[in-house]
Amino acid sequence: MIQVDGLCKVYRVPEKSLGLAGSVRSLWRRRYRQVPAVQELSFRIEAGERVGFLGPNGAGKTTTLKMLSGLLKPTGGRLSVAGFEPFRRHPDFLRRITLVMGQKQQLLWDLPAAETFELNRALFDLEATSYRATLAELIELLQLEPLLQRPVRNLSLGERMKCELAAALLHKPDILFLDEPTIGLDVTMQEAVRSFVAEWNERQGATVLLTSHYMADIAALCSRVLVIAGGRLRFDGALDELVERYAPDRRIRVRTTQPVNRATAAAAGPFLPVQGGCEALVPGHQVKEIVHKALLHLPVRDLVVEEAPLEDVIRRLFEQEKESHGKPGS
């Protein structure tokens, strides 16, 4: 569904010296510098996949999404989305994709969301019966009935995002580009948006490419992730593989029926006493052995084995990338 080969985007950015003199000189002789935003990016996404697209601020994620959706023309490389070159903006291509950006909106601010829905019906020339059926499905999934006739300016951020999603999906696109769709939402609304995206993907078989700084979004929706840093692809694979590569240790937390001292904790393995029990950080392949020893030597009330939070995994990946690219010759 999506094929990217050697994709590049370089911005030509003007530079100006400070002060009035610099402003005057820039009128006659403007200087520019080349700023690479995306460099030699290559990946494939199959129909129906839900893929997370991760990276630090300024990594090139939004620039990539804009190229995939046809808002920007690549500087170099090849790009195919549903068999089309996105930047040509062919009408059949536009009917097959949608782009939802959490910090942008398409809803008409002073009118009810239903008015934007009708406008999109006209723009996409949707057949009336099909439009009404799709709208009814979206209203049910997103629980929009109480919101349809209220002016958009009077909706909460979460209510607006639900209406944004409905407006973006009325034409039943095959591909969803989602850029921070849960930004600024509370925990309950984030969960509602995640549940909707998952259910829509399953019902329609739509391909989803999701960027988010909320790792709960990625963990809930995506089994595969692409990680970009410095405009280059740093990882492409299963989420479990990413965790295993950058955070292979597991934390074993034991709550005990009575306090344990350092010697008792050490008898069970690399445990250290903490309030209410003890804990240890061990390689994943040693978990079974250490858990067995803990059950033998400690007065266990309960025991939990935890993976590193996904935020820590991504942080470690970025730190390793910074270190490797800071070395001479890297």
Image (cartoon, rainbow, N blue to C red):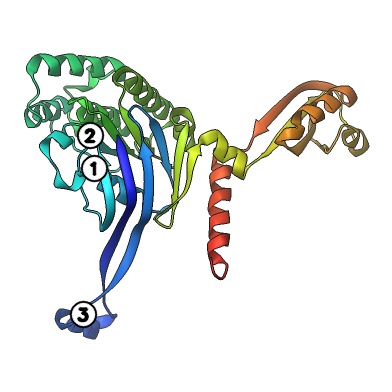
Distance from the alpha carbon under mark 2 to that under mark 3? 42 Å
Which residue corresponds to the image point at 19% horizontal and 25% vertical from the top-left? Answer: 170
Left or right: 235 as drawn, with respect to 261:
left
Which residue corresponds to the image point at 77% horizontal and 37% vertical from the top-left? Answer: 280
Q: For the residue marked with disc 2, what is the amino acid?
A: Ile
Distance from the alpha carbon under mark 2 to that under mark 1? 7 Å
* Label 2 with label 1: CB-CB less than 8 Å: yes
Q: Secondary structure at mark 1?
A: loop
Q: Which residue is mark 3?
A: 23
Which residue corresponds to the image point at 39% horizontal and 22% vertical from the top-left? Answer: 195
Which comes before the other along the chain, label 2 or label 1? 1
Q: For the residue marked with disc 1, what is the amino acid?
A: Ser
Q: Is residue 309 visible?
A: no
Say the numbered circle drawn on residue 69. 1
Q: Secondary structure at mark 3?
A: helix
Q: Which residue is mark 2?
A: 97
Which comes before the other along the chain, label 2 or label 3? 3
Q: For the residue marked with disc 3, what is the amino acid?
A: Ser
Q: Quadrant of residue 22?
A: bottom left
Q: Position of residue 321 (x, y in %)?
A: 54, 56
